[in-house]
Image (tube, rainbow, N blue to C red):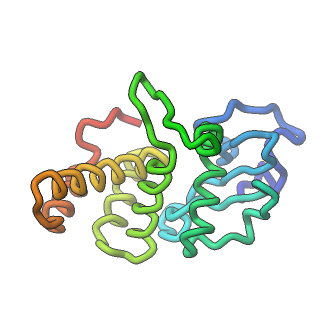
């Protein structure tokens, strides 16, 4: 918990900040005030907090602090709360258009879950090494998760298209090459 937040939801006694990017001053990511939930940034060096940043408040009537990211169902609820921009599409069972491309919101959450699972299981351990290195370069939790999830997606697609098994050595090599051509933080 940051000294500025003292456990208060965003906006109580402070100027509200727009949803989206975390704020460096308070280390809070404002999700959606109507949902009454918010997330702290992960703690540097604490792998568990990089699985899913600490959540506070309620979402869909659930106390987020009571949910355990180790439980896949709980993790999906936390990820959904973190992504308010996906909620309408999730309810409607429809894709979103992002930069003119269709995005399946359920698949998006599952990709986040895939990266979280790697961190929880420390399998491969190079995933955690990549997270620490990328965080040291200034990337935030969401961008790091997207970088790693993109590798998961590429490798799964290649294995399916080429009818070949997943190559863990290639995946570890790709993790070491991140951020690659991702924009600087």
The location of residue 89, given as percent across then percent down, is 59, 38
Apparent side of residue 118 relative to residue 95 in the rendered image (left or right):
left
Which residue sits furthest front? 93
Q: Nearer the viewer, residue 167 or 39?
A: 167
Which residue sits furthest top? 100
**In the rendered view of the protein, which quadrant contains the N terminus?**
bottom right
Residue 101 visible? The answer is yes
Residue 24 visible? The answer is no
Above or below: residue 78 compared with residue 17: below
Residue at 58 percent across and 37 percent down: it is 21
**In the rendered view of the protein, which quadrant contains the C terminus?**
top left
Number of numbered discs on residues? 0
The location of residue 128, given as percent across then percent down, is 37, 66
Apparent side of residue 105 relative to residue 180 in the rendered image (left or right):
right
Residue at 56 percent across and 58 percent down: it is 42
Residue at 46 percent across and 57 percent down: it is 110
Residue at 46 percent across and 42 percent down: it is 104
The location of residue 59, given as percent across then percent down, is 76, 54
The location of residue 168, given as percent across then percent down, is 18, 68
Image quadrant where residue 127 sits? bottom left
């Amino acid at each position: 918990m940051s000294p500025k937040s003292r456990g208060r939801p965003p906006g109580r006694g402070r100027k509200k900040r727009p949803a989206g990017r975390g704020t460096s001053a308070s280390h809070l990511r404002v999700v959606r005030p109507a949902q009454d939930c918010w997330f702290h940034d992960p703690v540097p060096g604490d792998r568990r907090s990089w699985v899913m940043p600490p959540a506070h408040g309620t979402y869909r009537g659930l106390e987020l602090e009571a949910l355990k990211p180790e439980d896949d169902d709980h993790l999906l609820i936390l990820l959904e709360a973190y992504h308010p921009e996906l909620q309408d599409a999730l309810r409607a069972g429809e894709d979103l258009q992002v930069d003119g491309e269709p995005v399946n919101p359920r698949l998006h959450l599952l990709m986040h879950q895939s990266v979280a699972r790697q961190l929880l299981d420390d399998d491969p351990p190079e995933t955690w090494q990549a997270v620490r290195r990328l965080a040291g370069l200034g990337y935030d939790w969401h961008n790091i998760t997207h970088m790693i999830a993109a590798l998961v997606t590429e490798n799964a697609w290649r294995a399916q298209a080429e009818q070949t098994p997943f190559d863990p050595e290639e995946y570890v090599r790709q993790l070491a090459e991140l951020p690659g051509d991702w924009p600087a933080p």
